[in-house]
Amino acid sequence: MEYTHYSVMRDACIEALAVHPEGTYIDCTTGLGGHAEQIAKRLTSAGRLFAIDQDEEALSKARQRLAPLADRITFIKENYAHVYEAVSQYGVTQIDGAIIDLGVSSYQLDNGQRGFSYKQEAPLDMRMDRQSALSAFDVVNGYSEEELKRVLYQYGEEKFAPQIARAIIKARQVSSVQTTTELVDIIKGALPEKVKAGGHHPAKKSFQAIRIEVNNELSIIEPTLRTLVSMMKPDGRLAVITFHSLEDRIVKQTFASLAKGCTCPPDFPMCVCGNKPKVTLITKKPIEPSEAELDENPRSRSAKLRVVKKR
């Protein structure tokens, strides 16, 4: 199967990174390599890009696609939560910039057997790293009603979480839920008719929630951002693309904390913590896709780009 690959806000990201030809950069979520390609093209042979992804299939395709630029790229299969360990094994502890494109990729959504999409029948999987132990099948068939409700509320902001969790428990008492289409039917059956007639697909929030749980997506964002900032040289840039409010809130709050510095209570007459601002906010408000990009790639509609510069 051939994939049409769109790099979300590619030009805005590359402009934000202000790539130095001899710099060291990290693409923490390489995917099929759209952003990585643009970074590598701007590097000389003295520059270096570390292209990281936990999805072996996507990384393999990126490696093939970027073969003409291979002299300046190091490909690493790893979760970006371990970014420092991943690049320090090559003797690199300081970088000039990094990019993270959060969430599920178009390649993963369109690959029918991966189980990310509520629009295609597939085994319940949703693992970005196919060597990971926990899959969507395990969550749907193994979690208690309370655990399912928590996941749907916390990661999908699904107000019908109790009804959906109850319906999943009831269905699996007959037989285990094996496929994405089975899960979609269960979710639809648990929702009021007026909700199913609304704009969004009725399973969208639940699939997002289960995917986040399977891949532990949210808890690793803040520590990774702090690690990357600590690795950056002065004036280094970090660009992060988010696709839903939960991700964006974490990025926004982490960047604000790094830009503020002092953590003393407001009623303290003077700072005693000694924390200094570590970054400057390049984007006070997030950059969003242009109308032209939305026409070409509707999946980018919810994307937001935030950028900081190391002080």
Image (tube, helix red, strand yellow):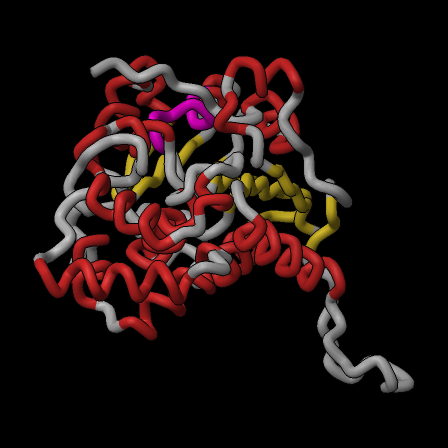
Of 50 and 282, the residue lying toward us: 282
Query: Which quarter of the rendered picture does the N terminus lie within?
Result: top left
Of 153 and 257, the residue lying toward us: 153
What's the residue at 66%, 18% (across, down)? Answer: 291
What's the residue at 47%, 57% (across, down)? Answer: 158
* Image mark count: 0
What's the residue at 25%, 42% (across, down)? Answer: 77
Instruction: Judge whether 141 appears above or below 270 on screen.
Output: above
Judge from the rendering whether residue 251 lies leftward or rightward of residue 36; answer left or right: right
Of 89 and 100, the residue lying toward us: 100
Please identify the residue farthest to the front as the structure is shown.
193
Q: Position of residue 66 (x, y in %)?
A: 33, 19
Q: Which residues are magenta?
A: 31-37
Residue 87 appears in view:
no
Q: Quadrant of residue 121?
A: top left
Let me know if residue 145 is in the magenta part: no
Q: Quadrant of residue 169?
A: bottom left
What's the residue at 47%, 26% (across, down)? Answer: 35
Q: Position of residue 188 (x, y in %)?
A: 34, 46
Let me know if residue 34 is in the magenta part: yes
Q: Position of residue 55 (x, y in %)?
A: 26, 40
Please identify the residue farthest to the left as the structure is shown.
175
